[in-house]
Each structure stands twice: as C-alpha cells, then as structure tokens.
Amino acid sequence: MSIRNSLLALLLFAAHAYAESEHQALGRDAGELTQQPQWNLTITPDGRGLPVGHGTAAEGKKIFNHQCASCHGFDAIGGSAMPLVGEVGSLTSEYPEKTVNSYWPYATTLFDYIRRSMPPQAPYSLSSHQIYALCAYILSQDGIIEADVELNEVTLPQVTMPNRDGFSATNSH
Amino acid sequence: MTTPLHSRRQFLQQAALGSALVSYSLPRLAKADIDYRELLPESMTKAGGEFTNYGQPSPYEQQVIRWISANPDMPGNGVSWSPLHELQGTITPNGLHFERHHNGVPAIDPAQHQLLIDGLVDKPLVFSVDALKRYPMQSRICFIECGGNSNSSWRSQPILTAAGYAHGLVSNAEWTGIPVRLLLEEAGIKPEAKWVIAEAADGASLNVSIPLEKLMNDALLALYQNGERLRPENGYPLRLVLPGWEGIVNVKWLRQLRLSNAPAMSRDETAQYTDLMPNGSARQFSFEMASKSLITSPSQGMTLPDKPGIYQVTGLAWSGRGKITRVEVSADGGQTWVDAELQQPILSKAFTRFSLPWKWQGQYAVLQSRATDETGYIQPTREQLLKERGRHGFFHFNAIISWEVSEEGYISHVYPE
C-alpha cells in the first residue's frame, strides 16, 4: 500500500470512528429464548400468556387461608396488605375503596400479578392450578363469578370485572 | 536611588491606611516555649485518618439519611424518602436517592444478567451487560419522581414530617446509558408496534407498559448514576430512565422489553398509579409529572433563630414537561408573590434550585413557592388541585406546599384556608 493510500485509509477510519451513530451491533439472536416460559410472563387481557390449569373458589379458599390471609386478612378484607374484595360500587362514594373486585379492570391481571409476586417471600411457588383457584375465590366473594365456576385459561379472560370501563388513558393531569 | 524605596514604603503605608485588607497589625513574636498543641484544634496536631477505598459522609452528618417507610409484614415493599431538607444544589447523592421497591432490592450478578428485546420486532435480540457497555452512551441530568410522591397531602390533615420525608420521593441525578432507540432499531421495529412492556428482574417481576414513542424519543437504558455504576437500589445493572415520567415506568433491574400493539394492563398500570377522579372514573397512563416546587429551607420542623433576621428561602422546582421558567415565593400564604432567583443550570426535566433572601420581622407568615414551566403551566394551589381531581386521587399530587412560620419562629406544614 502506498503512503498515499495508507493516509486515505486512516482518514476514512477516523471519519467513521467519530461518526455519531456508528457502533457495532452486539445483540445476539434470541429466537429460541423468546419461546421459553421464563421470558413469557406477561398475561394480557385477551388471555395470551395464561398457562393451562383450573381451579375453583372452594379450593382457593383453603390456599388463601394458608398462603395469603396473614397479610390480606381472612375473607380477603385486608390486613397489613390491601383488601382484595368488597366495596364494589364504592368508587363514587365519599370513601371509595380500591379493591381487586371494585377497581381492577381485568381478571387476567389478577393471575399475572399473583404469579409474578405473591406470596412475596416466595414468588412463583404457587402452581397454575392454585392461582386459578385463588382467582376464583377472590372473584366469587363479590359474585363476579358464581361460587362453583371453574376458572381456567379459557374462562378467566371471559370474566367481566365491574370496573371494566372505569379507566381512560391520559397523558396529562 | 533611595527615593524609590522610600516612596514605595510611603505608598505601602498609605495603601494600608486606605485598605481594610492589610489593616491588621502583627503581634510581637511569640515566646519560644509556647505549646501550640494547647492552642490549635486537635485536627492540626496529629496525623489525619487513613485513605478510604470508598468515601463516606462526615460522622457529623449522620442525620442526613433516607427515611424508610415499609410494610412490616413485607419489608421489601415500601419507600425511602430523600432528605431534601438537608441537601443543597440539585444533584442527589447516590446513597440518598429515593427508593421505591415492590419486593426488595434484588442482588443481581451482571455476568448472569441479560436484556431481551422481543415481541413485534424483526429479530428478537438478547444483550449481555458487557456487550451493552460497548455501546455509545449519553448522559442526562433529570429528576425521577414517584407517582405517589406527596401522597400524604391528599389527607384531610397536613402531615408534620420534614419536607423531604413528605415530598422526597423525587431525586435528581446524572444518568448515563444507551439511547433505547439504538437497541430497538437494532432489533427492527415492526410497524404495528405501539407499546413496549418492560419487565424487571426483581422479586415482583415488575411489569409496566410504555408507549413506544417515548422510548424512541429520549429514553435511556442507564448503566451509570452520577458517574458510577447504578446502585443496587436504583436498578443495578440496568434500568430505564424516562425523563419527566413517573418513577414506575423508569423500570429498574430491566430484563425484557417486549414490543406490543397494546398495553399489558398490568397491576401497576391499573390498580396502582392511576388517578381516581370524583366521578368514579380513573385516569390511566398519566405519565408526565407536572410542574412542582418545594421550599426545602426553612421548612417543617425547623426554627428561625433570630428575630428579626435574614433567611435564605431556598428550594427545588421541576417539571416533567420541560424547563422551569419561573419560581415565585410568597410569605403571606399566596396573597403576594416575589420572583425567586433561579440558579444555573436550568435543565429540562431536571431539578432547578431557587432562592430568595427574606427579612423576617417576627410576624406570623406562610411561606409558599409556585413554579411555572416552559409550557406556561403554573403549579396549582391545593384547593385548585382538589377541585379538579377530588380528594381520592392519591397519585400525582403537585400542588403548592405551605410552611407556616409562627411568631416564635417555629415552622410547620399547613393547609392554608
């Protein structure tokens, strides 16, 4: 390479080296990863992400008393942690209470949240069946579902929460 | 050639007469047997302490701490408040940046941590932390404020805790990291993508949905906080920083960004961080933190020692919509206002320090500050905010905060009539 060509190469390198957007793409192919369950935790209102499983309120009550009542209170009316049931229709009252049953717009969120964070000392320790049962127990407390309904990956997204239409998106306040 | 010297001596004598700088006279020479150890402070008569690998504040500043408020049955769920009333300037020290954790601070080995970008992309990509450290980085000084900051101000009685311990779920730092846009573009964004579901690697697997537009605009994947790697409680090894937007979407310990056509409707964007309005409906995705200010000194719990006396009224102002353009201070509960001085630099979506000397004559007073941002939005009174939002909003409280000064100089938080 002549001296002239070397200098030219150096100049080109320098120009590229200092170009603002120039960087090496270092992301690795994640085609397999994205199929794995540990990277598919979010459950959306249409039921995408729900695992196979089933449970009823009667089963859920036993699990609740064992796993949840110490913080959420027996019958889920609240303790050191939030009340989960009751107060449906209270949102326009002088003392509104935001429980799962009075405020949450989607039942699928309940499954999503229990699985990812409850009980707090041992997230992901409950089976899918247990979580469906807990959802059934909580929702049946206010008659959102009948006491004998089995919740599963098909029926849970079909539940209509009382405050389903209570939210409006905004980006100012 | 004696004249110049003489003249010079005369000049110096005249100068000494005319200038206070050299108007002292030297004492006679000290005696030879004087023991200076009896005269000097101990710090000057012995060797000092050792070097430290990582410096700590003076032991005399041990009261300058975050105040922790957590659920006793679930100690990892709670907050710690930044002691804004003890701080000056605009940068929050890393050890005092406020915290909000939903299930504790995870211990993450960066060598084991991965960031996955998937969903509505051309090719899902995974990044190691070491790979991310090779990307071009930018720095941005901005505040992060929890959507629940100042939530005690929704109560019917004013809370009597120090300014930072009621309003300090907001902090300001220089964040350094990779524009999120670079990483999303590397994966290739499909046209139907509108939202990005961000998920954390903590004990709550916290997940929230963020409009794609914000991540393409000014969001950073931050690795550094005030020049050093993120603190564990602030997201080590990776976090999102979304300038001006409520804390919850500045996801710490980030492990995944999933591009989607709709939000996930997760618990923390439905049950929490939504604003219940008087008509029973709730505002959702109210991300932008509106203009706000707080007098940090003098403030709740402090005492004015001299009467009359001159006091530096100082505090912080910030807006999630841009720069602060004006801060006014009132000493009569908002009847009359005076413009405070805004200290440089005034940065968009960052703390701006304001100050104003105040001559207190010993009278009853109510100190307030009121911020205006570059959109023209003026920080509302508490009365105005409650009229618009009702009494049960719980989140996004940004109204004027009032400090009552008694004739004895005691300062306490009040709601003015």
Image: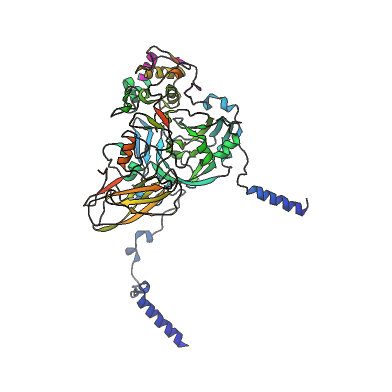
- B301 left or right, relative to B194: left
In this view, which residue lies farthest toward the left? B407
Magenta-drawn stretch contains A46: yes
Q: Main secondary structure of the magenta part?
A: loop
Seen in the picture, residue B228 relative to B361 is either above or below; the reply is above
Report x, y in % for residue B275. 37, 33
Magenta-drawn stretch contains A155: no
Q: Nearer the viewer, residue B8 or B315?
A: B315
> Can residue B62 be seen at all in this image of the molecule?
no
Seen in the picture, residue B55 relative to B17 is either above or below; the reply is above
> Can residue B244 be seen at all in this image of the molecule?
yes
Q: How many marks?
A: 0
Report x, y in % for residue B325. 41, 50
Query: Magenta part of the protein: which range?
Result: A40-64
Residue B259, quarter of the rendered image: top right
Report x, y in % for residue B15. 38, 78
Q: Residue drawn 51% across and 42% down?
A: B218
Q: Nearer the viewer, residue B9 or B321?
A: B321
Q: Residue drawn 72% across and 50% down?
A: A9
Image quarter of the C terminus of chain A: top left
Report x, y in % for residue A40. 52, 26
Q: Nearer the viewer, residue B213 or A120?
A: B213
- B335 left or right, relative to A147: left
Q: Residue drawn 49% across and 21% down?
A: A50
